[in-house]
Amino acid sequence: MSEETPGFDEKPEVPDAGQNDAEPKAADSAKEEAAAPAGDASQDVALLAQLDQARTALSERTADLQRLQAEYQNYRRRVERDRITVKEIAVASLLTELLPTLDDIGRAREHGELVGGFKSVAESLETVAAKMGLQQFGKEGEPFDPTIHEALMHSYAPDITEDTCVAILQPGYRIGERTIRPARVAVAEPQPGAAPKSESAEGEAPDGLDADAPDKG
């Protein structure tokens, strides 16, 4: 008879593999759930930082664009202003060369020599000069202004109270507000020691009455 070895009939208890695997998975899941809020918060902070950087960059690019646009507008205005100035200088230079011819036309008109074909050509030239902005000025009897008049002759007159242009020896010309030639004139000045008209009129008595006679009561 063979003897049975005691204890071989009893099987050792083996832990369930499925149960052992479930416990680590449950622990990992709990760790992930605990770490998830912290991860989302850090991601939100990173996104906000990127958004702030994008806004800052957009503001800088917008300011650069506005500055560039302002500089371009200033450049356009400066170019337009320079273009107008150059045009005015060119026109003034051309018309200045024509002034002696216009003076000859004026003298011929004064002497009655502006007739026939010469008259037609002269009037056409004057019309073209006027279209280019040329304006003639200077009239007898207007007050003398040294900024637009050039006095070539001086005299005295008892019936004026200020320097007056009594003769236009050569008309002046301007383009807009720019004088290209002053009017050359003869100027009359008030007579030295002459009383103004207002004062002399006050001292005069009515006709038939003596200014020194006493009033009759």
Image: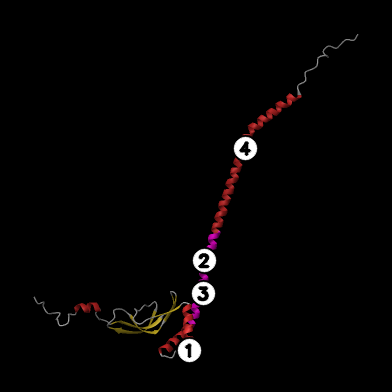
Q: Amino acid at mark 4?
A: Asp
Q: Amino acid at mark 3?
A: Lys
Q: Which residue is mark 2?
A: 77
The span picked out in magenta is 68-97
Q: Which residue is mark 1?
A: 118
Location of residue 170 (image quadrant): bottom left
Q: Which residue is mark 4?
A: 40
Residue 3 lies, with reference to residue 201, above or below; the image says above
Location of residue 109 (image quadrant): bottom left
Q: Which residue is mark 3?
A: 87
Q: Amino acid at mark 1?
A: Phe
* Comes first in the chain, label 1 or label 4: 4
In magenta segment, residue 147: no
In magenta segment, residue 73: yes
Separation of marks 3 and 2 at Cα, in angstroms: 15 Å
Determine whether label 1 and label 4 are within 8 Å by CB.
no
Mark 1 vs mark 2, foreground winner is 1
Say if residue 180 shows up in the picture. Answer: no
Is residue 88 toward the left or the right of residue 212 in the image? Answer: right
Going 52% across and 67% down the picture, which residue do you hit?
Answer: 78
At mark 1, the secondary structure is helix
